Image (cartoon, rainbow, N blue to C red):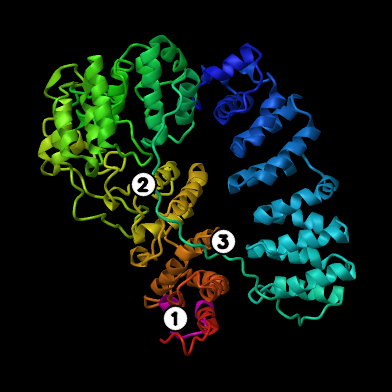
Amino acid sequence: MTRNLRLDVRLVAHHQLPVPDNPEYLRGWLAHAHVVLTKDDLDQVPWCTPEVVPYRFVEHVRCSVAAALPAPELSQVVVAGVERGWLDRCEAVELVLAALDGARRPSDRKAWLGAWLDDLGVTDAEIVACADALVPVLANDPGAVQRLAPVLIARVDDDRLADVATVALATPTKKVLRTVLEALATRSRPSTQTAQVLGPQVIAVDVSSDRPSARAVQTVLDTWGLSGDVPPEPTQVKGLWQPVPPVWIPPRFDHGEDSVEALVLAAAELSARPGMHIVDLAVERFLALANAVARRDPDLARSALSGVCDTSDAGLAPVAGWVHGRPGGYLDNKAHKVPSCRLRGLLEAREAAVFQRLGQVPCLLSEPSTVDLQIAPQDLLDRLQAYHDAGASASESDLLLALTRLDVSGADPRLRHTLDGLAVPVLLQSGKPVTFTAGPAASRYLADPAVEPAELTTWWPGLYQWSVTVWKVEKKDVPGSLRGFPPRLTMQGADSAVFPTWGDTVLDVDTYEYNRGLGLQMRRVANRAAPLAPPAVLEFLTAGRTAHPAAVADTAAAVAEAWGRGLLRPGTPGGRYVDLDTPPGGLAAMARLLGQAAGEGLLAVVWQVLDDLAGVAASGQRIATGASEVVGTIATLLPEVVHAVAEGTADPAVLTMPGTRAVAARSGTSKAVTTARAVVSARPDARTRIRG
């Protein structure tokens, strides 16, 4: 756990066990080691046990680096270990270099680079000795180019200079590029072969708006005896226009083996996540495992969960209370002064109910059937039959959530008839029974389900949010089949974990820049069965522009998952919902992320999005800031699109490009306008095949 010393960390040190190659265990060890090695007053951390940190310290560090744990904490632990003599400096230098090479998040690369150069004091000679290993690092990080390229360019031999300079010249940051050019300008003329390789690249650099860079380029040409006239290299087409994957069929949900080890790992996964109440597959897996293990051996389950502290995190809030035999989190509070706060929302109440009667029921009625959180009517029937056979009672919130998750299209009269005969008692949180039984309640709901509102998502341009529904369940919206339940649905807005069969009304993703749970919310959306609405596609692809560092990895994974599952479809991308005057709706950031997505094979979706954004940029009295980046990205991708049309992979209509033509039609000679005109002119048969 990140806020308390995990039991498994303590046990490994106490019993002198091998270091588990498990990311969740290693996260727990890292959290503890970071506190021990970086905090001055450990008395303020009552759970801290400093003596376990030196145990197999080197092995823990090696495994943590291999698992790509967050560098800001791990790099500090490595440096502190060297200072205390627990880790040899030479090995630390090699480990940090390996971690730097494998780092994907900018924050990780920055932390490892700082540890390598500053804290471990790597010398210029050591940097040059690692030149081959540093080339991939330079390719991924402008910060590394800024700090490493001048040393490497000045000191590597000619054979390596071509590789180093090639990746360094590709940096997108003008300030860093100037540093590279100035470093090349101070180097004496390399071999003829190297000069012939690098010369065209230096000449091709756009230095029209940067006089120091232009002077550096001219110095390189003069010193190396090169001509400024170099024929352009042919455009290399990479085949980025890939067929859109078919819409997937969400697979069955499986909570895994009912073991103590699986339960501990599931709890560790939840505790290592951002502190957000996001109910997703990880929460569902943990709740189902907790009930299964407790049903077999309550004491064993209590021991396995004894390391969980009081928290408000999804899935874990009621755990500490259950372990210690006291009321847990998310219970109703009848004594609250504000009547509207006395009753918990459905998701919170379900978690409280699970631990109120943990292990007393055969299974959870609300456990999803498929990974999109829907429940098949036949599965609910089978579960209620198990309750009936075991003489168990259902919890009202668990049953209510199971009903709202039902795929009502999968019911038939015979199934409803069977449900009518399952008179399973239903209990409130107080332990009192309600006036109806579970089977008939499920049968009534199948005939009278909650219906998604006709008015879909309300879009709020200018806010740091997208797809945030303002629809709140009112009493009139609750179907008659549910009015015997406590009014928990009216305590919250629409949520895809409550109504997974609904569409765009429950696209509950918040791109506010401090939202640590953005990635988890997006990955939950990427599990849905239906494709995203066109405006949501735009924001889904560009949500990473405001992602909190804790959400970056999951945000990128969500985009890849949604694409692979066919949820991101080409179509009108809804650029009209973009507020160009309010950050972080910046076009430049959007263009950068869309270009990255195109480079990963999503060009078929990205292309129309970019053109739509170009049209939005040209729609105002002035061309919007960032338009040049959007049009520049379009220009870069145009050869790929032309190739796809020629190969028959893309429809020729994608080259109509109304948004780009709108920019080109504007007066003036701004970079956006001139680039757009060049793009329009470069289209094949632009004057004859595509009119307007």
Secondary structure beneath label 1: helix
In the image, residue 261 above or below residue 664? above
Q: What element carries label 2?
A: loop
The percent position of residue 186, horizontal first and vertical second, equals 83, 65
Distance between the Cα atoms at labels 1 and 2? 36 Å
* Farthest-out residue, top: 299
- Give the magenta-colored segment's residue range: 657-674
Q: In which quarter of the image is the C terminus?
A: bottom left
The residue labelled by disc 1 is 661
- Name which residue lies at 66% across and 74% down: 206
Whether residue 360 appears in magenta in the rendering, the answer is: no
Q: Which amino acid does label 3 sit on?
A: Gly
Residue 442, located in which quarter of the rendered image?
top left
State the CA–CA distance, disc 2 to disc 3: 25 Å
Which callout, 1 or 2, points to the residue nearer the camera? Answer: 2
Question: Tag 3: Cα neighbours inside 10 Å, few (<14), some, or many (≥20)?
Answer: some
Left or right: 582, with 129 as reference point: left
Q: Horizontally, is 50 left or right of 345 in the view?
A: right
Can I make out residue 486 in this image? no
Sequence-earlier tag: 3 or 1:
3
- Assign the magenta stretch its main secondary structure: helix
Q: Mark 2 points at which residue?
A: 528
Q: Which label was assigned to residue 599? A: 3
